[in-house]
């Protein structure tokens, strides 16, 4: 049972607060992704867990053991670094065996583990080579092999795929996922790539300004973002946000968006009532709008500004009120810039956002 | 599962033993820092105190220089008498002039010859490039001593012995390898894309060099020129061997060492150190360019 | 060095880089490679060691044999040859000028003939400065013939037309410049060699029938200079001291340099200032540093001043004297460490900065403690830097020179570079000086190769 508990951890650099009072729990054998833009504190948090930069405040425990002030080597973790940090003066074999040697394993055990790890990463035939003669992808495999050879119950990964080119990244992503399912370590994985996060993590912690914005399953983070930042950070294209005005019409709340009145879902009615007469943000994902070529009931007429054929879909840019909105359509939906289309907004796909604090409004469940 | 991390602060119960570990670690860190500072200050004193000694000898009266025991407090009385005595001694001013002439010729000559080679090393891949680099490195590793004797004999035969110009030729040979390597690394620090951009916008390669590269490398070239100046200024073996009448300052001081008084020697020692002290200040940024990258 | 960035590769042969490196190549060939070869040659080749004897008194004639320089020979005969046209310019030929004169001989005849210039005192010259008239000189030597013979040709061996008395007036008709050749004989081993040589190679002794070979015309490989170097009374002390200093100085420098590097790498506030202070000595000449340490160790210097003011001694101690060699060694040791540790530090700091931080962190995460990180990661990765610093330092240590002169007066403690200087400057033995400098070169190369092997770097490891 190797869960990781992070309680009120704060880390400062001079006056800059990199990690601000963060608490989270990572269950045994779970794969958690720390996701966020650069400078959000995700790497700092990972390093605090690794012991590479002690937390200024708060407490970290691994498997029930308080490790807050322990040096890295006493934390029983292993790690994959962003630059791989392969020891350039050692062969692949010695690199993979390094941690085992430092922890004084027996020779036969070291050999067995090195070969197992190498086999898992398909680098058995490179064990005698030096890293300087290897490609980025190969070094990456060595770095991962070195980490998993330790068989630590906690595996930390700091943007392990960010130095690979796009195609290789796609390949390694799938391979890493398979591997991590196999070795069953509790894993914390730092990335700024939301696709990596969505495709790999059991849970995603979205970070911004040293704080966790949302910590949830990938589909939840995608579908039910906790705030405007999460919605706008995750997804490609990110969630659209439009200015709206809440109005009350004989007891029923309506929101005026552009020159169109929307009826929010029934469940939202009580919540929105308090916004009566004030502006609000409406959020909706590009693929959740229905696009029609002809006028229809409840459909908003808009002019198409840009058409971007992406193969799997056609992405339209339209203007609603003052906001530019991205709309995903079927690739067979043919439309030219300047044409009009009609959009329909399914009420259950709309997320209402408080304009002042950016929080997405959800009915208490 | 969906706990967004903002539990109130008081909820954390830090165990006493963790607190103790933390305190111990902090104390150890502080101790380590204090020890490092202490060591750094001790080494600084080791470097600085002898300089302070010679400076205070040079900047006082000759009587004070001869006095015993010397006051450990420096500069009492503060006077330029000793320095004046040194500068007015026979052969010192001509030596000073010769030293400057030799050093200036050396730095001009070595920069002019080394700059193209440095540029070639940093910008082109050509057959024999590694050979050239290696031989430059090797040349730098050869002792000065072994060059001076044969060059003296050659210069004697050629009738250009005992001349500041032939000494400058020799000093240029000494400075050239380092200058080439330093300038190559200075050029390498300017991305070639900048030159390409200049050429895209209508410069010829020469113009691109003149308008884009040259202004950017100027500080680096200046640093290497200062380095060359000091190398020539300091060099004493070849200077003593290659000159008789036209001695440079170090050669003059060395040759007259046995007949000279302590005020003369100390003032001379101090005087010869001045350019080096200034030099280190100006080339700090290039320190690692100059010696650091030797292994690469 | 960054070679990867900004390099343009081309398939077609591009001559530009070659043109750019040409000046430096030419310069280094001219003022580096060539003098170095010359230096080695000077040490092992004796110029003019042998004199070639000819069968006739002409340089084109067949070789009769060779005799070594310095040998005593018999002068059997001599002859003066007219110098072939165009050869007048050879300044160092031993020549004789003969005048063609007309005058009255002892038997009352007026003859025209030749006599050496030394027998005639010129009285008048013509407008163009050529001698026109003169008188025969009197011969002071009592044993010699007081009369001056007049020869038919400008040659001692030619027929004598008549003799003139001293002070007889003569008309000078013309003159000829002759090169003098001696017919000499000498023993080379068991066989006696005889032959003709130009007179300039021979210095006649006493009565002109004996002579010594002053110089030869052929050089020869010799171990003389090396033997002279080795047999010099300063050679072994110099070699011993040089090696001893290297052994004493270099380890201390590396320890100090690594400590300096660690202080700088600790990234404390003010480490920039530390770097500046630590590298101050980088630009100091060994002469200036010698003087600095002389001011400390001299009898009325700072060391004694401090000790006395602390009451630790009653009278100044003499450190730098022949009786206290070990103190001189200590002073040189301290001065060298003071002066030359900075360069080692710079190289090591640069090497440390090149080690990626993540690599060190990886070692930490995978369980290496501080000592293991130093042992398994830092030292191996510093190896190329250490190697370079070792080579550079050793080569520089072989050249320590002015510092030793200042602190020891130049002969109490002496080193190889010092001896090179002495042989060249004080004793004017260029060849022995060259032998010393060649020895320094060889020692430098041997130690460099030793380091390259001993501190072998994993080639592939250096990215």
Image (cartoon, rainbow, N blue to C red):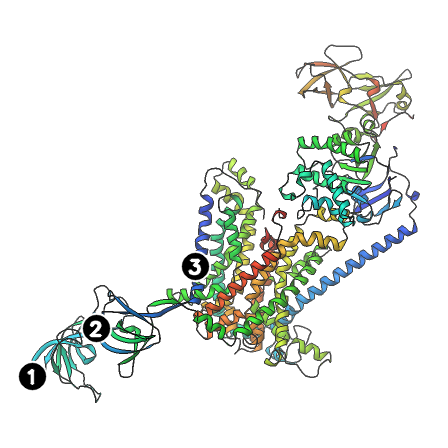
Mark 1–mark 3 Cα distance, whole angstroms, equals 67 Å
Q: Residue furthest front?
A: C190
Residue B6: % across, % down: 88, 38
Dot 1: within a 10 Å radius of its alpha carbon, few (fewer than 14), some, or many (20 or more) residues? few
Label 2 lies in what chain? C
Residue B241: % across, % down: 46, 69
Mark before the other along the chain sequence, 1 or 2: 2
Question: Which secondary structure, mark 3?
Answer: helix
Checking the image for residue C80, the label placed there is 2
Q: Are marks 2 and 3 in contact (CB under 8 Å)?
A: no
Q: Nearer the viewer, mark 2 or mark 3?
A: 2
The one of A179 and B2 positioned closer to us in this rendering: A179
Residue B33: % across, % down: 77, 58
**Label 1 sits on residue:** C108
Say whether residue C76 is left or right of residue A51: left
* Residues at marks 2 and 3 on the same chain: yes
The answer to whether one can see residue B81 in this image is: no
Mark before the other along the chain sequence, 1 or 3: 3
Residue A137: % across, % down: 67, 36
Name the quadrant containing residue A33.
top right
Label 3 lies in what chain? C
Say whether residue A92 is left or right of residue B258: right
């Amino acid at each position: 049972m190797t869960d990781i508990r992070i309680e009120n951890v704060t880390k400062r650099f001079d006056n800059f607060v990199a990690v601000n009072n963060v608490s989270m729990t990572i269950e045994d054998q779970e794969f958690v992704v720390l996701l966020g833009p650069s400078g959000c504190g995700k790497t700092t948090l990972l390093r605090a867990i690794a012991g590479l930069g002690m937390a200024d405040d708060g407490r970290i425990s691994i498997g029930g053991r308080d490790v807050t002030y322990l040096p890295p080597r006493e934390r029983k973790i292993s790690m994959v670094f962003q630059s791989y940090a392969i020891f350039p003066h050692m062969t692949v074999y010695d690199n993979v065996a390094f941690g085992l040697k430092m922890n004084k394993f027996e020779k036969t055990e070291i050999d067995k583990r090195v070969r197992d790890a190498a086999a898992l990463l398909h680098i058995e035939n490179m064990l005698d080579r030096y890293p300087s003669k290897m490609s980025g992808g190969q070094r990456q495999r060595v770095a991962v092999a070195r980490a998993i050879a330790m068989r630590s119950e906690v595996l930390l990964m700091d943007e392990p795929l960010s130095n690979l080119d796009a195609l290789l990244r796609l390949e390694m992503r799938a391979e890493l996922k398979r591997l991590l399912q196999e070795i069953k370590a509790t894993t914390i994985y730092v990335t700024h790539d939301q696709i990596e996060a969505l495709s790999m993590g059991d849970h995603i912690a979205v970070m911004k300004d040293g704080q966790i914005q949302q910590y949830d399953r990938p589909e939840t983070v995608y579908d039910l973002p906790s705030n405007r930042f999460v919605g706008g950070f995750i997804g490609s294209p990110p969630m659209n946000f439009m200015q709206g005005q809440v109005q009350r019409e004989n007891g029923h709340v309506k929101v005026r968006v552009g020159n169109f009145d929307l009826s929010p879902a029934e469940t939202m009615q009580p919540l929105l009532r308090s916004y009566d007469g004030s502006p609000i943000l409406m959020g909706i994902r590009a693929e959740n709008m229905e696009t029609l070529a002809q006028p229809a009931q409840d459909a908003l007429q808009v002019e198409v500004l840009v058409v971007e054929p992406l193969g799997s879909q056609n992405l339209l840019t339209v203007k609603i009120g003052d906001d530019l909105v991205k709309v995903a359509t079927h690739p067979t939906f043919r439309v030219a810039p300047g044409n009009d289309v009609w959009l329909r907004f399914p009420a259950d796909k709309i997320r209402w956002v408080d304009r002042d604090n950016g929080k997405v409004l959800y009915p208490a469940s | 599962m969906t706990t967004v991390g903002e539990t109130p602060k008081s909820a954390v119960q830090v165990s006493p033993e963790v607190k103790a570990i933390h305190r111990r670690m902090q104390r150890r860190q502080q101790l380590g820092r204090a020890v490092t500072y202490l060591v750094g200050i001790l080494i600084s004193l080791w470097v600085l105190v002898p300089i302070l000694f010679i400076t205070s000898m040079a900047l006082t009266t000759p009587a004070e220089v001869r006095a015993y025991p010397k006051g450990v407090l420096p500069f009492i009385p503060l006077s330029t008498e000793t320095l004046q005595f040194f500068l007015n001694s026979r052969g010192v001013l001509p030596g000073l002039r010769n030293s400057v002439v030799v050093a200036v010729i050396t730095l001009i000559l070595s920069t002019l010859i080394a700059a193209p080679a440095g540029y070639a090393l940093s910008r082109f891949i050509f057959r024999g490039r590694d050979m050239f680099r290696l031989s430059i490195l090797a040349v730098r590793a050869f002792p000065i001593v072994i060059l001076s004797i044969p060059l003296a004999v050659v210069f004697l035969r050629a009738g250009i012995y005992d001349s500041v110009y032939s000494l400058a030729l020799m000093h240029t040979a000494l400075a050239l390898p380092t200058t080439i390597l330093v300038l190559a690394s200075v050029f390498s620090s300017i991305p070639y894309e900048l030159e390409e951009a200049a050429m895209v916008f209508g410069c010829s390669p020469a113009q691109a060099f003149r308008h884009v590269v040259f202004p950017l490398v100027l500080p680096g070239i200046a640093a290497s020129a200062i380095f060359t100046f000091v190398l020539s200024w300091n060099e004493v073996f070849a200077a003593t061997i290659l000159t008789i009448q036209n001695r440079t300052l170090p050669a003059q001081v060395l040759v007259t060492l046995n007949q000279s008084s302590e005020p003369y020697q100390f003032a001379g020692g101090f005087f010869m150190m001045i350019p080096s002290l200034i030099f280190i200040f100006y080339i700090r940024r290039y320190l690692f360019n100059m010696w650091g990258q030797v292994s690469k | 060095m960054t070679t990867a960035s900004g390099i343009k590769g081309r398939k077609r042969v591009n001559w530009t880089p070659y043109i750019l490196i040409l000046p430096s190549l030419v310069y280094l060939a001219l003022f580096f490679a060539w003098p170095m070869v010359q230096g080695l040659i000077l040490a092992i080749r004796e110029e003019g060691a042998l004199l070639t004897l000819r069968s006739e008194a002409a340089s084109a004639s067949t070789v009769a044999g060779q005799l070594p320089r310095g040998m005593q020979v018999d002068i059997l005969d001599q002859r003066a040859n007219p110098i072939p046209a165009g050869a007048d310019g050879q300044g160092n030929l031993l020549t004789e000028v003969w005048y063609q004169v007309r005058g009255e001989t002892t038997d009352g005849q007026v003859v025209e003939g030749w006599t050496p210039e030394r027998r005639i005192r010129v009285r008048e010259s013509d407008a163009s400065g050529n001698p026109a008239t003169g008188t025969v000189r009197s011969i002071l030597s009592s044993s010699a013939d007081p009369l001056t013979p007049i020869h038919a040709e400008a040659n001692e061996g030619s027929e004598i037309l008549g003799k003139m008395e001293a002070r007889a007036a003569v008309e000078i008709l013309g003159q000829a410049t002759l090169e003098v050749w001696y017919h000499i004989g000498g023993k080379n081993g068991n066989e006696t060699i005889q032959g003709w040589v130009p007179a300039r190679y021979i210095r006649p002794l006493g009565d002109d029938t004996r002579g010594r070979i002053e110089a030869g015309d052929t050089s020869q490989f010799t171990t003389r200079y090396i033997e002279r170097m080795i047999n010099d009374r300063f050679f072994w002390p110099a070699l011993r001291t040089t090696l001893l200093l290297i052994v004493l100085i270099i380890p201390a420098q590396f320890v100090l340099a690594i400590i300096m590097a660690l202080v700088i790498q600790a990234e404390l506030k003010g480490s920039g200032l530390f770097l500046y202070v630590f590298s101050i000595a980088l630009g100091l000449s060994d002469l200036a540093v010698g003087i600095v340490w002389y001011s400390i160790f001299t009898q009325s210097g700072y060391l004694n001043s401090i000790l006395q003011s602390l009451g630790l001694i009653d009278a100044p101690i003499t450190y730098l004297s022949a009786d206290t060699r070990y103190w001189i060694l200590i002073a040189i040791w301290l001065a060298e460490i003071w002066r030359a540790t900075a360069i080692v530090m710079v190289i090591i700091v640069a090497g440390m900065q090149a080690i990626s931080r993540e690599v060190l962190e990886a070692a930490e995460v995978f369980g290496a403690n501080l000592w293991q990180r130093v042992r398994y990661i830092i030292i191996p990765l510093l190896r190329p830097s250490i190697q370079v610093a070792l080579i550079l330092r050793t080569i520089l240590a072989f050249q320590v020179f002015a510092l030793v002169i200042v602190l020891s007066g130049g002969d109490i403690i002496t080193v190889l570079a010092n001896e090179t200087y002495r042989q060249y400057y004080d004793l004017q033995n260029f060849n022995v000086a060259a032998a010393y400098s060649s020895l320094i070169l060889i020692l430098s190369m041997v130690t460099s190769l030793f380091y390259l092997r001993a501190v072998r770097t994993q080639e592939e490891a250096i990215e």
